Image (spheres, grey):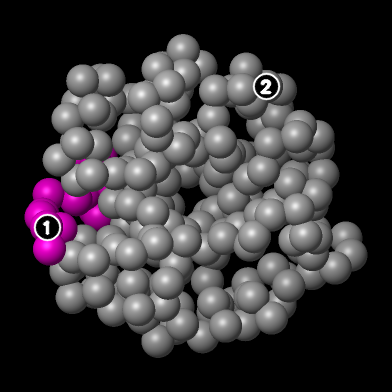
Amino acid sequence: MGKTIRMKNKFRIKVCGMRDRNNIRELLALNPDYIGFIFYSKSKRFMDRSIDGIDFQNTKKTGVFVDESLSKVRDTAKRYQLDVLQLHGNETPQYCLELKEEGYEIIKAFAVDEEFDFKQSFPYLKVTDLFLFDAKGKQPGGNGITFNWKKLEEYQYPQPFLLSGGISMNHLEELKIFSHPEYVGIDINSGFERSPGLKNIPEIKSFIKEIKI
């Protein structure tokens, strides 16, 4: 693969699994494009706290859900005034469409391994805004593992995607040369943590500076 192609869209940074108010404010000073809150009760980064009074400015508040009822998603989105809904389970295209028609930006996540068939993403092309390709692990996300990015050469659909799955500073050089026409950003989480839900802000600052060069 050659030099990263990023001309089609602004390159985006999403930081997921935030919980601590002070940690959130420190992160927001770096102006990430998305900040993710995980509303999946089995996650070590489950969000059960208030974010009232925090100024998010242009950073999009993203709620991560796993096979949750539409009513629960709607209630949570209203309570936290979410801009984006990331669906990380087996949600149907119709499920995605209903939420998209309510005005939310929709990110559909897919767990990728060597056996994954990207045809699974086809029914979601018109009912989502972004795909997120994560590594398949024991949990729906936040497993701290990567997948073989060469697998993405098989992805041929015209839907932009975020790359996810155990990304850390150790992957910086690989990311600088990774290339795909629909690759528009990176989702980071466990690879930049001091403990579950508590991010290493100086390290994220350094990563953002380097990856956007």
Q: Residue at x 61, y 58 (%)?
A: 185
Tell me if residue 140 can be seen.
no
**Secondary structure under badge 1?**
loop
Give the residue type that dot 2 points to. Phe
Q: Is residue 40 above or below residue 20?
A: above
Q: Position of residue 108 (x, y in %)?
A: 50, 34
Residue denoted by label 2: 122
Q: Position of residue 99 (x, y in %)?
A: 38, 24
Q: In the displayed image of the protein, which residue is found farthest to the right?
A: 2
The part of the image, by quadrant, that contains residue 83 is top left
Would residue 178 appear left or right of 97 to someone viewing this image?
right
Q: Residue at x 69, y 68 (%)?
A: 175
Residue denoted by label 1: 52
Q: Residue at x 80, y 49 (%)?
A: 181
Residue 114 falls inside the magenta stretch: no
Give the residue type that dot 1 points to. Asp
Magenta span: 38-53
